[in-house]
Image: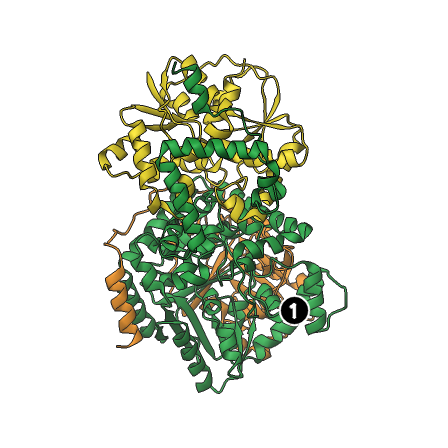
Chain colours: A green, B orange, C yellow
């Protein structure tokens, strides 16, 4: 599970070696993007909805402390215990404490990217607490001891045969049976039993409503509800940016979320939890883990508007052709590439470069985060801070010197062109990544500048 | 300083200047025939819908739908109301429930979801643990979109409530849609016609 | 109308015919075109690689060359975008004037010159490649992600070209994977993206791929050549200038 981190470009080239699978991955996610387009186009007010969602989130960020306090007070009045965790470690400790208090051994967990970010599963496993991820995709990757490769479609990097092999190994299904209904039913049987026999249910949070002190969880499988309702303890974990001011704002976000994510008009379940059921305990853990720092970075704070729909993943031509694991972060894709450097610049310095800056991510984002601009801005910070290495800086300095001076530029261009036409072998070799799978343009006899001097300036 | 105080202080220090709360500047799509639109949307997501005259008709259809199975009727006006027996049963005791019939408060045409507060469910487990779910809703309670729905409901009136749209589903295996990942394998909606 | 011609550095060096076509085209529409001889590069390759802080000298040189032109026209959406968003020389008012006066070629033709007829002929099957920076950031055409009225400045211009049959790919505006230094730092993904674009064009049985940015086209050309395909790339200026 703890594989060594490879730079995105290297991991991506490994991913692309299995050309057929890579093509499948690209086409499947493109299909999801196409469904998103179709869903968006059923609503003439789509762009207005995005604008409203963006504005609500901007407003919320500007009064975040007030709304968190309002939320806390209302939630407590609703009988919910509210905890605050400044980092991943504290988040994991709080949860462990609650579990231990109940002498619980077995936990069912529905999808929560925050618990992935905090590496909760490892933490609990090391303390002899068993956690079962109940979202089918997450369950599959958990059995394989992998990380989700996509925040909405966790097992999108796997094919039916992989799932079949995994279930054969862990659930004793028929060897080689890769019928998706058969496999889903097999998981259903196992997981329904887990729901019923667990002690504690952990969930994520999609939206936390300040005005009413409740939370909303959106799932298609209903696994969050099954887990919570079947158990005596419910722990919901949320990054503090999940807060929204009013219940009426849910109308905007729920119209956008599933349409952006999968093209569905809404998730199968949009569940509003305000008070624990009789005899149940409900906890909410509000987590920072670097978010206050991101809030303080003016250029990057709007990344906290994210509602984790993954539309930017599905539309990203780089993500589709490199797979989620190449991003070596709990949140992959374009949004992950602007969130990750905030957590660890050194480890994630490659991610803002895993993009062509095509801007499609920004266009699909339901809360209008300027993702591609933030990728650009992260590049500037990372290189200034020296994460690009000395060689890269030296070559850029050379380039800058050439472009600052027209005489040097004319020389170098001419030299470069001549170099290529005389000794193509020198440039067109395996050390030049351009030439590996592409040819170079035919160098012309003269530059435009030379032509212009001859033909027009005379 | 506690983490709570630290987080709040850091937010106060780092947050942007106040931005006003926006008013919605778009016109939400509405449908002339909300019931037709509702039925069309539900069909698209794997559910079934029937418009019936009244609850007697639901009764009639129910008797043909389920035989020799454990059925929970959660609507007191329907024959065989028995939900109160299930109010405090736990998950293990509910596992054998085949069909649950409950009332929905509002149905939303744009996405086929139906708002069901806890009091309609009797037991929060019921709509999730059953194999088949049947929801009954009045035609006059079918609305066009989520804005209309939220304007009519009070989200915290009950401790729990959910918009339910179609049977559970998953597409986690190669994006192939499978109906019934964990919960109900089918959803049937009865709309009680307003024309009496 | 006096126009300062801004030619991207790689066009100057590798595709002079595109610059010549741009010049001739603007002259055909009555512009007095000047090419400031000491221009080099807009600085985009450095800035997109994260080294915008090294581009001051480059920016100053650019501003020196283009100050005084009410219209600065360039046959590249990407370079224009960079100038518009990131040109910051030592003299801010001068920088702002340049940022404000720079136009991408098709945008200049449709919006400033309001070109309604073009005397050009190009009797071929041509595939349209939409470059991202021009499209998504300069808004030279509508975008498939957005719920908006469809339009395209390039297609509007090409519709006047006699004999030209314009064909679109299935994924109408997916990025080709050039992306500046991305094309070498992420070589595998870049090539995979380019190959997919090329394959979709080839499915349409086209003879040429047309676009508004030679950088994208250079990448696609490199792939086509490696495939030994007979399909060629053309900048839109070359086609609008074709007789």
**Would you place residue C166 above or below residue C85 in this image?**
above
Residue C14 image offset from top left, x and y in percent: 51, 29
Answer left or right for A219 relative to C201. left
Q: Quadrant of the N terminus of chain C?
A: top left
Towards the viewer: B119 or C234: C234
Q: Residue at x 33, y 49 (%)?
A: A55
Q: Chain of mark 1?
A: A
Towards the viewer: A70 or A10: A10
Towards the viewer: B125 or A130: A130
- SS for dot 1: helix
Answer left or right for A210 relative to A312. left
Towards the viewer: B121 or A424: A424
Question: Which quadrant would residue B5 be assigned to in this image?
Answer: bottom left
**Would you place residue B35 above or below residue C129 in this image?**
below
**Would you place residue C23 above or below residue A241 in this image?**
above
**Would you place residue A280 above or below residue B169 in this image?**
below
Residue A32 image offset from top left, x and y in percent: 57, 49
Residue holding disc 1: A187
Q: Quadrant of the C terminus of chain C?
A: top right
Answer left or right for B45 relative to C47. right
Question: Which quadrant would residue A423 be assigned to in this image?
Answer: top right
Residue A1 image offset from top left, x and y in percent: 57, 70
Question: Which quadrant would residue A172 be assigned to in this image?
Answer: bottom right
Residue A416 image offset from top left, x and y in percent: 50, 35
Answer left or right for B53 relative to B158. right
């Amino acid at each position: 599970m703890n594989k060594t981190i490879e730079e995105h470009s290297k991991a991506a080239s490994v991913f692309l070696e299995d050309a057929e699978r890579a093509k499948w991955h690209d086409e499947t996610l493109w299909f999801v993007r196409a469904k998103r387009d179709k869903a968006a186009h059923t609503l003439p007010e789509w762009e207005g909805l995005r604008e409203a969602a963006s504005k609500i989130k901007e407003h919320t960020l500007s009064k975040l402390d007030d709304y968190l306090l309002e939320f806390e007070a209302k939630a407590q009045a609703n009988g919910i215990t509210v905890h605050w965790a400044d980092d991943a470690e504290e988040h994991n400790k709080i949860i462990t404490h609650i579990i231990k208090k109940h002498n619980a051994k077995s936990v069912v967990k529905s999808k929560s990217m925050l618990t992935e970010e905090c590496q909760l599963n490892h933490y609990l496993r090391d303390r002899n607490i068993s956690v079962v991820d109940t979202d089918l995709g997450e369950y599959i990757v958990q059995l394989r001891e992998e990380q989700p490769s996509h925040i909405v479609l966790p097992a999108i990097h796997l094919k039916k045969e992989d799932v079949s092999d995994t279930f054969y190994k862990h659930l004793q299904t028929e060897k080689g049976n890769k019928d998706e209904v058969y496999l889903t039913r097999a998981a259903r049987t196992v997981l329904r039993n887990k729901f019923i026999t667990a002690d504690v249910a952990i969930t994520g949070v999609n939206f936390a409503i300040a005005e009413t002190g409740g939370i909303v969880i959106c799932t298609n499988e209903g696994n969050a509800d099954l887990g919570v309702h079947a158990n005596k303890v419910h722990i919901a974990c949320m990054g503090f940016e999940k807060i929204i001011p009013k219940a009426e704002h849910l109308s905007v976000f729920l119209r956008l979320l599933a349409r952006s994510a999968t093209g569905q008009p809404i998730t199968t379940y949009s569940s509003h939890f305000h008070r624990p059921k009789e005899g149940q305990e409900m906890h909410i853990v509000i987590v920072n883990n670097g978010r206050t720092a991101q809030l303080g970075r003016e250029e990057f704070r709007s990344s906290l508007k994210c509602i984790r729909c993954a539309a930017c993943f599905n539309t990203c031509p780089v993500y589709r052709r490199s797979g989620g694991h190449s991003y070596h972060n709990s949140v992959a894709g374009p949004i992950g590439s602007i969130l990750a450097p905030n957590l660890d610049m050194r480890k994630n310095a490659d991610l803002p470069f895993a993009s062509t800056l095509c801007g499609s991510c920004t266009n699909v984002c339901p809360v209008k985060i300027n993702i591609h601009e933030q990728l650009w801005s992260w590049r500037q910070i990372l290189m200034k801070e020296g994460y690009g290495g000395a060689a890269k800086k030296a070559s850029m300095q050379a380039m800058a010197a050439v472009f600052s001076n027209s005489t040097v530029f004319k020389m170098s261009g001419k030299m470069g062109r001549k170099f290529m036409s005389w000794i193509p072998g020198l440039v067109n070799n395996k050390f030049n990544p351009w030439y590996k799978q592409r040819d170079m343009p035919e160098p012309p006899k003269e530059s435009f500048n030379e032509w212009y001097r001859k033909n027009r300036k005379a | 300083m506690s983490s709570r105080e630290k987080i709040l202080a850091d937010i106060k220090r780092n947050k942007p200047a106040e931005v006003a709360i926006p008013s919605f500047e778009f016109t939400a799509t509405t449908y002339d025939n909300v019931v037709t639109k509702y039925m069309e949307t539900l069909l698209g997501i794997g559910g079934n819908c029937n418009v019936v005259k009244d609850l007697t008709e639901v009764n009639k259809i129910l008797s043909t739908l389920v035989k020799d199975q454990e059925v929970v009727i959660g609507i007191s006006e329907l024959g065989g109301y028995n939900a109160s027996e299930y109010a405090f049963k736990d998950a293990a005791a509910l596992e054998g429930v085949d069909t649950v019939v409950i009332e929905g408060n509002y149905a939303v045409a744009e996405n086929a979801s139906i708002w069901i507060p806890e009091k309609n469910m009797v037991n929060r487990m019921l709509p999730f643990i059953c194999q088949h779910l049947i929801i009954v809703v009045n035609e006059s309670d079918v609305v066009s979109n989520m804005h209309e729905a939220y304007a009519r409901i009070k989200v915290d009136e009950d401790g729990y409530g959910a918009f339910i749209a179609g049977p559970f589903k998953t597409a986690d295996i190669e994006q192939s849609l499978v109906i019934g990942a964990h919960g109900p394998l089918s959803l049937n909606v009865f709309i009680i016609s307003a024309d009496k | 109308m006096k126009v300062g011609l801004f030619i991207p550095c790689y066009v100057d060096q590798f595709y002079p015919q595109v610059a010549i076509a741009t010049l001739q085209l603007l002259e055909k529409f009555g512009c007095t075109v000047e090419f400031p001889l000491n221009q080099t590069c807009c600085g985009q390759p450095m800035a997109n690689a994260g080294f915008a802080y090294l581009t001051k000298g480059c920016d100053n040189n650019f501003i020196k060359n283009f100050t005084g032109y009410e219209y600065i026209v360039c046959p590249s959406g990407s370079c224009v975008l960079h100038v518009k968003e990131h040109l910051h020389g030592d003299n801010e008012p001068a920088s702002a004037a340049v940022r404000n006066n720079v136009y991408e070629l098709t945008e200049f033709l449709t919006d400033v010159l309001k070109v309604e007829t073009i005397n050009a002929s190009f009797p071929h099957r041509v595939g349209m490649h939409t470059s991202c920076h021009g499209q998504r950031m300069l808004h030279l055409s509508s975008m498939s992600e957005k719920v908006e009225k469809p339009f395209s400045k390039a297609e509007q211009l090409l519709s006047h070209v006699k004999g030209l049959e314009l064909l679109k790919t299935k994924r109408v505006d997916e990025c080709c994977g050039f992306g500046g230094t991305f094309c070498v730092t992420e070589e595998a993904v870049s090539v995979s993206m380019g190959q997919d674009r090329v394959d979709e064009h080839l499915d349409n049985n086209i003879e040429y791929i047309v676009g508004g940015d030679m950088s994208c086209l250079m990448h696609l050309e490199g792939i086509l050549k490696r495939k030994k395909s007979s399909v060629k790339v053309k900048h839109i200026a070359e086609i609008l200038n074709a007789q």
